[in-house]
Amino acid sequence: MENVSGVLGTRKFVHRAPNAYWLEDISGRIKLEGFIDGLCTGAVVGVLGAADHSGIFQVQKIKYPDFPPELPKPTPNKGFVCLISGIECGSE
């Protein structure tokens, strides 16, 4: 396979337009501006803020979901646990 860098050139692509974030639900989409930090596509978040007169949602705070509380592990009512180490079965 030949080197195609001569055909494509060495120019790097740089996207100069600012990132745009959109909040989407079953009713539609609205553009977000304001306090937005590190979101990615498909993130499930809560957003606190208000829509301005131009239809852009001004974000004041983003709430990320927490982990659910850990359920208590059941304790056995009867029985024993046996730990065995160093049996060396079949060794001489």
Image (spheres, helix red, strand yellow):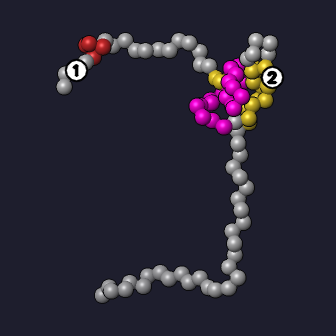
> Residue, x 76% and y 20% (percent of image)?
58
Q: Which residue is mark 2?
A: 50
Q: Mark 1: few, some, or many residues within 10 Å (few <14, many ≥20)?
A: few
Residue 36 appearing in the image: no
| Region in magenta | 23-44
| Image-based side of 77 in relation to 5, left or right | right
Q: Mark 2: few, some, or many residues within 10 Å (few <14, many ≥20)?
A: few
Q: Is residue 13 magenta?
A: no
Q: Which residue type does callout 1 highlight?
A: Asn
> Residue, x 42% and y 85% (percent of image)?
87
Quadrant location of residue 92? bottom left
Q: Is residue 38 magenta?
A: yes
**Pointer 2 or 1: first along the chain:** 1
Question: In x, y percent, where is residue 28?
Answer: 69, 26
Question: In x, y percent, where is residue 89?
Answer: 37, 86
Classify 88 as above or below 45: below
Most foreground residue, 27 or 14: 27
Label 2: which secondary element:
strand
> Residue, x 37% and y 12% (percent of image)?
11
Question: In x, y percent, where is residue 8?
Answer: 30, 14
Q: Which residue is mark 1?
A: 3
